[in-house]
Image: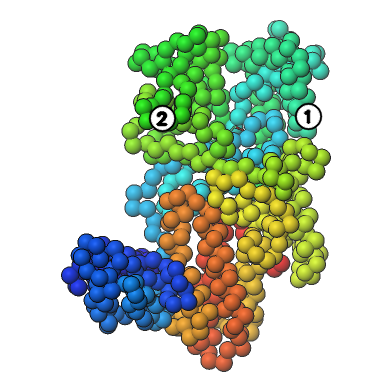
Amino acid sequence: MKKIMELMAEELSAAFEKAGYDPAYGRVTVSSRPDLCEYQCNGAMAGAKAYKKAPFIIADQVADQLKDSRIFSMVEVVKPGFINLKLDESYLASWLNEMATHEKLSVNTAEQPKTIIIDYGGPNVAKPLHVGHLRSAIIGESIKRIGRFVGHKMIGDVHLGDWGLQMGLIITELKHRQPELVYFDETYTGEYPSEAPFTIGELEEIYPCASAKSKEDEEYRKEALEATHLLQQGNPGYTALWNHILNVSVTDLKRNYANLDVSFDLWKKESDAQPYIPEMVQHMKDEGYAYEDQGALVVDVKEESDTKEIPPCILLKSDGASLYTTTDLATIVERMKLFNPDEILYVVDKRQELHFIQVFRCARKTGLVKEDTKLSFLGFGTMNGKDGKPFKTREGGVMRLENLISEIDEEMFHKIVENRSVKDKDAQETAKIVGLSAIKYGDLSNQATKDYIFDIDRFTSFEGNTGPYILYTIVRIKSILSRFKENGGDLEAGTLLPAVGISEKNLMLQLAGFGATIENAFEEKAPHKICAYIYEVSNAFNSFYHETKILSEEDPMRKQSYIRLITLAKRVLETSIDLLGFTAPDKM
Ligand code: ARG
């Protein structure tokens, strides 16, 4: 279905052409002066040079061609040559009626659907999820949903970190604490009890403890490195322990992600890529890409146009151990083999940008991906506390995701109970739903690449540019609709009539922008554009609501039209928040 902006642009282009000018000048934009007009075309200004004519003359001639247009109710030329436009109310209403019957509310699905692997979440096994992982999960989940909505095959992969030194550290600490465990027995062959010798709580205490020890105690660190090495060599006891660590961790992670309404199609791990390493390395050697440098095996990835130094990719260290880079390269090999994707998109902290520049260049140079497979990096900024420093607990520790969520839920609970519109029994459940909107909207409403301040007070407010405000608006619409229905109204009947009021028309204009917003948000991988959009829609709805007696409207056709309008507003808002990754309650 054609967007309203496209239809206007077509009309303008045709007018330019009929007046004897290049139709390319017929571009239409949203007005920068909403007090004067709704849309504008600046093509005459652009064309003035090419045609050596005053822009005002061109604009006048173009406007002449639009006299009988049924799309516009106003076409006005203003000095020095702008064409100011207002949409015709009947045209707008009939377009919106069509939008309401369109399965995707005017969003066109991709003509050539792409297979896109999206690598997000990226938690590390045995380390608790912390707020740093929150952004990746929230942004990645939203982009996955938007991509799916516009028709692409999105494959979300959590890409668990299960292969680094952290495993060796945990195993070492376990060995110190419980040397009698069967897994440390020299004769152990691989049969192991199904019960893990630790709980998730213990595991989360073991890692930081081991990590701290390894920083102070050189001997301990060596032991951990050796344990990592043995694990990577397939030592049966260590492998069994690693399996336990993985199981206990993954169970806990799944619970955490479920609380965030984040889900993955694949639970692949760094270790899954290990079998691809030997052949990949051999290929890079055979083709002459990889060479030895001070004992390590490296591939040059610098390019002439570089303005800063891009160091070579290290494939293998001098002791033959592989690195984070090696794993990411081998993961690309695996992904190409299993899914042959058109794109792999990484949603990772922007401080890892150099790593991904190296990995992408190396993968391309050595032919790990086909030429038209895109490798993209969406690097996000840091979530800071009010002091502008990375978010911490009151005690100054790393804030665990779970604690952060319960803090928000509690805050929400108090506000909801204060409002007294929800029974105590349901308030807890509602607080969770609204709390999630506070966290996700608070994050997504900022451009992903920027740092932002996590401000619980602001994010949980029912007023302003917040998740709870958006939900409040949806709940308000739901309540009008259910009162209408209780009074015997038919929610499906009637059609949208041309707007009579200004706030009514403004709401219609806002709703008409849905399709372009969603398509653009995907194009630019920018969920914040959806946030900005639904904030405008909510404001437009609330002005309309305050100025209009919806349920006490006497003209039945007009009343039915209001119902159609707010139903469409509800669908636009609900679809949008679903793409952002949260839902609205019935009451709050
Ligand atoms: N586990 C990593 C970390 O916590 C993030 C993984 C990102 N994805 C990737 N393919 N490297 O830093």
Q: Is mark 1 within 8 Å of ligand 1?
A: no
Question: Is residue 193 among the parts visible in the rendering?
Answer: no
Residues under numbered marks 1 and 2 in contact, where contact means CB atoms less than 8 Å apart: no
**Residue 30: x %, y % from top left:** 42, 68
Seen at 53% across and 13% down, the residue is: 317
Foreground mark, 1 or 2, reads 2
Which part of the image, by quadrant, shows the N terminus? bottom left
Which three-letter amino acid code belongs to the residue tagged 1?
Answer: Glu
Question: Is residue 151 among the parts visible in the rendering?
Answer: yes
Seen in the picture, residue 140 relative to 4 is either above or below; the reply is above
* First in sequence: mark 1 vs mark 2: 1
Q: Secondary structure at mark 2?
A: loop
**Residue 29: x %, y % from top left:** 39, 66
The residue identified by callout 1 is 205
For residue 49, the mark is none
Residue placed farthest to the left in the image?
A: 20
**Residue 146: x %, y % from top left:** 49, 52
Q: Secondary structure at mark 1?
A: helix
Query: Which quarter of the picture shows residue 39?
Result: bottom left
User: Pointer 1: residues within 10 angstroms few (<14), some, or many (20+)?
Assistant: some
The residue identified by callout 2 is 306
User: What number of labels is visible?
Assistant: 2
Seen at 58% across and 55% down, the residue is: 445
Which part of the image, by quadrant, shows the C terminus? bottom right
Q: CA distance from mark 1 to mark 2?
A: 44 Å
Q: In the depicted view, which residue is nearer to us: 275 or 286? A: 286
Which three-letter amino acid code belongs to the residue tagged 2?
Answer: Asp
**Residue 323 falls left or right of residue 207:** left
